[in-house]
Image: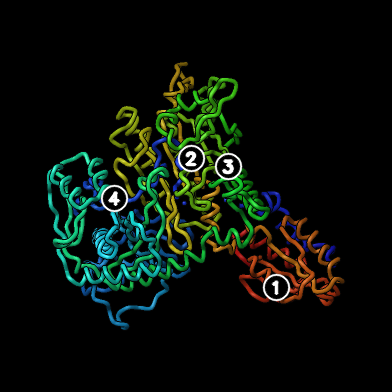
């Protein structure tokens, strides 16, 4: 019967797992920053304005290489192969970054060497899964960057040909494409995109030259006024350097631009060009300024690349966490009732958050961290001392007045942890001190920039701060690297790009402490044996840092984990410890986060698994489907026994069996247990799983054993 005793091996195995926390229950658009100046504090795209001239005009050899990919899964290794084509040109390159010895490798589609590449025959081009291909981004390929930048200009020229009242603003390249913002009376529709693309092809087929021209500020102003382009005048005012550069397409169209571009519109491949969508965007991102129409497009070197990109976008749309979150009833954002960017966790989503948080807390405590809980608000003076009020004011909400004092919703957790440190005088013997908090912070985001769980106004950082001696810095960083690997692997992320960012031009602190901190980061990475890329000058103003970009199931990169060395805040808050000689010295502070933001990481999880979560993290692990009312009491006994072993099970009945099964599949429940009178009489369950299909009748103890093993091994059953 369901109350029967489980085999001793099963009980022992599962009992041990429960002692470790219910089978060791385990843990987007802007990555969250830990302190002002941290990477990811603001989003932006490469612009064609003067401010990007230095980057845009540099030769291809100076373009940053794609950072090496670190893979920590068994049987994985890093392959720092060059992304080039040798010998007879082929569409496909060898796989680079990393591949599994036990799974289908993810392939990288290398940039070809010219703007338009001859398409190989069917015999030359192997059949591959589009989702196994990593396409190059604009940062990976100077040729693609030029193609996309020129495509933006050609699109603007086409729009102004078709819509005489259209005024242009900016038109940059972005990671996988380009866009241009227009001020125009007529609303652009999907059918209009086809018309615009057709006009673009006409321009491409004319093979018009793109000519760079240098003019004086006065001459640029005269030309702009002549064609009545007020937005260009505002852009011109923002350009501080001279001479002013413009790019012309033939003799018909021009724009203020620093480049770079291809030599001729004929260098664009019309079969590799697609206009994707239209969106609204405020001029300069300011809600008080005019609403513009932004047309997005993508451009590639070959039609094959475009086809792969299109299929990848379709898959990404299928995995959209906003749609899946609604379908599975995981969370909502109550835009009208409560305001944008504020997440409501529904019961199933809240259960998953509970599991993630429990795993996070247990793992940190096992690694020598102590947990903190700190307030959501503080007097504004605290943020002035920390520097947030000066450096981060635009991303903070307005103050609230309480008894004639100004209070501020916290945008960061670090000043609160510092206040705890300052409560007493610390000896060098107490260091390192490791504190961690799942602290909710609040940051102002413009309404047009918010995006599901990826960019919100209230979110929870998995914040951690380490106060240590200079001699302990490398060991502590290595410890964080090990923790990052352990936690990310538990959630199925075993491949990531690692970047080390060094001292920027504007920074605090002397050369000695910067060099020591950077050397400690390098030493820890080398001891870990991980490849990494160096971003010269990309560090925060207060110290160098390591950033991680994880790769999901379809090859997209998401910035999550970060490790930042800080000697600015210890100075600002006058932190001290007593050394061996009884002298007062400054500790070094390490900021670190693994998820970055709990909300954003949850969105990444949803999209990575497309809602098909591993058994250990699924909100409902098993759903029992009694066929008749007479089977319900037995089903209740089975549920009680499953819950006694820490499994999350429920009963759903009252419908025809076919509908019950379809609903369970729609809800992506990992394990279904069908119970009829035969199962009741034989103390069994007819098992059906999403991963394994129909498994047939099994005893309750056997089902619990299999589920326990799947939970412990982080797999489906």
**Tag 1 secondary structure:** helix
Figure quadrant of residue 98: bottom left
Q: Are marks 1 and 4 in contact (CB under 8 Å)?
A: no
- Please rate how many residues cluster around mark 1, counting C-alpha atoms within 10 Å: few if below 14, some from 14 to 19, many from 20: many
Q: Residues within 10 Å of mark 4 (few under 14, many from 20)?
A: some
Could you tell which of marks 3 and 1 lies nearer the N-terminus? 3
Q: Quadrant of residue 80?
A: bottom left
In the picture, the disc for residue 444 is 2
Task: Write the residue at 63% across / 66% down.
Answer: 668
Of tags 2 and 1, the one toward the viewer is 2
Q: Is residue 144 visible?
A: no
Instruction: Using the rendered image of the protein, determine whether residue 437 is visible from the camera's viewpoint.
Output: yes
Q: Is residue 587 above or below residue 559?
A: above
Q: Which residue is mark 1?
A: 661
Label 3, on which residue?
364
Q: CA distance from mark 2 to mark 3?
A: 30 Å
Please provide percent x and percent y for residue 387.
42, 28
Mark 2 or 3, which is nearer the eye?
A: 2
Q: CA distance from mark 3 to mark 4?
A: 42 Å
Label 2 crowd (10 A; few <14 / some 14-19 / many >=20): some
**Residue 20's spot in the image, x, y percent?**
67, 49
Given the current orientation, which residue lies at the most extreme top position?
Answer: 582
């Amino acid at each position: 019967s369901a109350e029967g005793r489980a085999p001793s091996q099963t009980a022992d195995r599962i009992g041990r797992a429960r002692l470790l926390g219910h089978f060791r229950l385990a843990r987007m658009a802007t990555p969250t920053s830990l302190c002002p100046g941290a990477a990811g504090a603001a989003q932006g795209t490469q612009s064609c304005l003067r401010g990007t001239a230095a980057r845009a005009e540099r030769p291809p050899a100076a373009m940053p290489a794609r950072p090496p990919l670190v893979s920590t899964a068994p049987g994985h290794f890093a392959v720092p192969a060059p992304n080039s084509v040798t010998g007879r040109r082929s569409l496909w390159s060898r796989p680079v970054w990393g591949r599994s010895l036990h799974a289908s490798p993810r392939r990288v589609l290398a940039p070809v060497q010219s703007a338009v590449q001859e398409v190989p025959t069917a015999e030359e081009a192997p059949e591959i899964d589009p989702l196994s291909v990593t396409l190059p981004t604009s940062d990976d390929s100077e040729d693609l960057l030029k193609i996309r930048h020129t495509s933006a200009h050609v699109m603007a020229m086409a729009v102004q040909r078709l819509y005489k009242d259209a005024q242009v603003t900016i038109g940059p390249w972005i990671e996988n494409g380009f866009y241009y913002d227009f001020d125009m009376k007529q609303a652009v529709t999907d059918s209009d995109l086809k018309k615009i693309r057709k006009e673009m092809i006409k321009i491409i087929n004319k093979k018009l030259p793109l000519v760079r021209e240098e003019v004086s500020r006065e001459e640029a102003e005269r030309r702009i006024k002549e064609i009545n382009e007020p937005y260009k005048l505002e852009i011109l005012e923002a350009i501080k350097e001279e001479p002013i550069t413009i790019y012309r397409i033939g003799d018909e169209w021009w724009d203020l631009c620093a480049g770079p571009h291809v030599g001729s519109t004929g260098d664009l491949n019309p079969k590799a060009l697609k206009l994707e969508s239209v969106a609204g965007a405020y001029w300069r991102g300011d809600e008080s300024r005019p609403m513009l129409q932004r047309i997005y497009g993508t451009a590639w070197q070959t039609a094959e690349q475009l086809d792969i990109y299109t299929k990848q976008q379709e898959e990404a749309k299928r995995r959209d966490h906003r749609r899946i979150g609604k379908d599975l009833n995981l969370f909502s954002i109550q835009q009208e009732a409560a305001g944008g960017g504020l997440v409501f966790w529904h019961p199933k989503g809240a259960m998953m958050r509970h599991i993630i948080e429990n795993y996070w807390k247990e793992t940190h405590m096992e690694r020598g961290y102590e947990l903190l809980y700190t307030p959501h608000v503080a007097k504004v003076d605290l943020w002035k001392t920390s520097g947030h009020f000066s450096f981060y004011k635009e991303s903070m909400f307005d103050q609230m007045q309480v008894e004639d004092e100004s209070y501020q919703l916290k945008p960061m957790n670090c000043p609160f942890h510092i206040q705890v440190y300052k409560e007493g005088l610390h000896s060098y013997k107490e260091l390192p001190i490791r504190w961690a908090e799942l602290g909710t912070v609040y940051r102002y985001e413009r309404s047009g920039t918010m995006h599901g769980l990826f960019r919100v106004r209230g979110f929870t950082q998995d914040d951690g701060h380490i106060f240590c001696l200079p001699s302990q810095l490398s060991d502590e960083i290595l410890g964080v690297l090990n923790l990052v690997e352990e936690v990310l692997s538990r959630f199925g992320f075993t491949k990531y790009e690692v970047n080390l960012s060094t001292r920027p031009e504007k920074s605090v602190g002397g050369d000695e402490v910067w060099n020591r901190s950077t050397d400690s980061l390098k030493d820890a990475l080398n001891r870990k044996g991980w490849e990494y890329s160096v971003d010269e000058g990309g560090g925060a103003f207060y110290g160098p840092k390591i950033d991680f970009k994880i790769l999901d199931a379809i090859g997209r990169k998401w910035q999550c984990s970060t490790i930042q060395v800080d000697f600015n805040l210890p100075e600002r808050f006058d932190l001290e410890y007593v050394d061996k000689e009884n002298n007062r010295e400054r500790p070094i502070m390490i900021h670190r986060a693994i998820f970055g933001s709990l909300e954003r990481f949850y969105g990444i999880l949803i999209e990575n698994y497309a809602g098909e979560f591993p058994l250990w993290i699924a909100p409902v692990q098993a759903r029992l489907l009694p066929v008749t009312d007479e089977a319900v009491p037995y089903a209740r006994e089975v549920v009680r026994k499953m819950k006694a072993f820490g499994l999350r099970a429920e009963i759903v009945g009252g419908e025809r069996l076919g509908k019950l099964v379809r609903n369970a599949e729609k809800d992506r429940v990992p394990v279904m247990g069908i119970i009829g009178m035969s199962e009741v009489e034989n103390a069994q369950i007819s098992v059906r799983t999403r991963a394994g299909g129909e498994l047939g009748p099994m005893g309750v103890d056997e089902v619990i054993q299999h589920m326990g093993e799947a939970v412990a091994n982080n797999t489906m059953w």
